[in-house]
């Protein structure tokens, strides 16, 4: 079967189960549940063997293959894109700061490829005409593991972005301060940004490439896969239960008709 074109994940559904299931079962017996893999201490992250992430990718693709067999290619891509796929980075900035935002996006994608990672970076370019903007930002923030905010006075003037930021999970936010700001400059909704450990662009030590490399270095790609697999397993179980309920309902109806 052809490759499932679901974003940038490069997912294939025609994987030989016989080739990978022994390794996956061995890994599952060690962890009991794939989700427990994410509970390793941060100090152990660097010691994780590369094969573990390879197995996770294969496991994800096997689950997608099972989903494809149940609901078809088009619906599988739709569910993966809307419900399962986790974005690596969400960039938020005012239109006046677009140049730096777009440069940061390019750098993230370029540096990630050098590290042999394929990252998904989302941002203002994902808002299209006709969208309910607040809904788009809510969806993007919910599905993104890291949120990078370019903080400037121009951002403070954008009431909609200010509102959306206020509603996001602040633990995922990394602020990048584009100018020197006093406490009084921050709107009350964004006061939390003052307490986040951010970077100062106006500092002579600021270097975009170094900042991007640091983001990628500290990103937990292992846990990223675990999150996708956990969501995909829930989606697949839901579809299985739905199919079973429909079968039972049809069988009951057939039995009643006979009588």
Image (tube, rainbow, N blue to C red):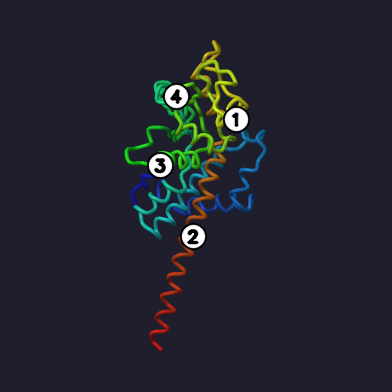
Residue hosting label 3: 10
Q: CA distance from mark 2 to mark 1?
A: 38 Å
Pinpoint residue 10: horizontal percent, then vertical percent.
Answer: 40, 42
Q: Nearer the viewer, residue 137 or 183?
A: 183
Q: Earlier in the sequence, mark 3 or mark 4?
A: 3
Q: Nearer the viewer, residue 20 or 79?
A: 79
Residue hosting label 4: 104
Rendered view: 227 above or below 146: below
Q: CA distance from mark 2 to mark 3?
A: 24 Å
Q: CA distance from mark 3 to mark 1?
A: 37 Å
Q: CA distance from mark 1 to mark 4?
A: 23 Å
Badge 3 marks a residue whose secondary structure is loop
Residue hosting label 2: 238
In the image, which is nearer the foreground, mark 2 or mark 1? Answer: 1
Badge 4 marks a residue whose secondary structure is helix
Q: Earlier in the sequence, mark 2 or mark 3?
A: 3
How busy is the neighbourhood of tag 2: few (under 14 within 10 Å), some, or many (20 plus)?
few
Contact flag, marks 3 and 4 (Cβ < 8 Å):
no
- Quadrant containing the C terminus is bottom left
In the image, which is nearer the foreground, mark 1 or mark 4? Answer: 1
Q: CA distance from mark 3 to mark 4?
A: 23 Å
Q: Earlier in the sequence, mark 2 or mark 4?
A: 4
């Amino acid at each position: 079967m052809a490759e499932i074109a679901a974003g940038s994940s490069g997912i294939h559904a025609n994987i030989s189960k016989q080739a990978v299931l022994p390794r996956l079962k061995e890994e599952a017996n060690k962890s009991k549940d794939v989700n427990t893999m994410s509970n390793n201490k941060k100090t152990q992250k660097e010691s994780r063997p590369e094969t573990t992430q390879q197995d996770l990718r294969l496991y994800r693709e096997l689950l997608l293959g099972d989903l494809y067999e149940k609901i078809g290619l088009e619906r599988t891509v739709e569910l993966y894109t809307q419900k399962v796929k986790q974005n690596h980075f969400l960039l938020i900035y005012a239109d006046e700061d677009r140049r730096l935002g777009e440069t940061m996006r390019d750098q993230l994608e370029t540096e990630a490829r050098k590290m042999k990672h394929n990252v998904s970076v989302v941002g203002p370019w994902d808002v299209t005409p006709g969208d309910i903007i607040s809904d788009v930002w809510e969806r993007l923030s919910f599905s993104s593991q890291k949120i990078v905010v370019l903080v400037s006075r121009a951002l403070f003037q954008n009431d909609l972005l200010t509102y959306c930021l206020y509603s996001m999970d602040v633990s995922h936010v990394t602020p990048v301060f584009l100018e020197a700001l006093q406490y009084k400059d921050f709107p009350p909704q964004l006061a939390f940004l003052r307490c986040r450990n951010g970077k100062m662009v106006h500092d002579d030590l600021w270097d975009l490439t170094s900042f991007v490399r640091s983001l990628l270095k500290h990103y937990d790609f292992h846990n990223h896969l675990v999150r996708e697999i956990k969501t995909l397993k829930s989606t697949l179980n839901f579809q299985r239960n739905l199919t079973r309920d429909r079968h039972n309902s049809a069988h009951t109806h057939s039995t009643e008709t006979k009588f």
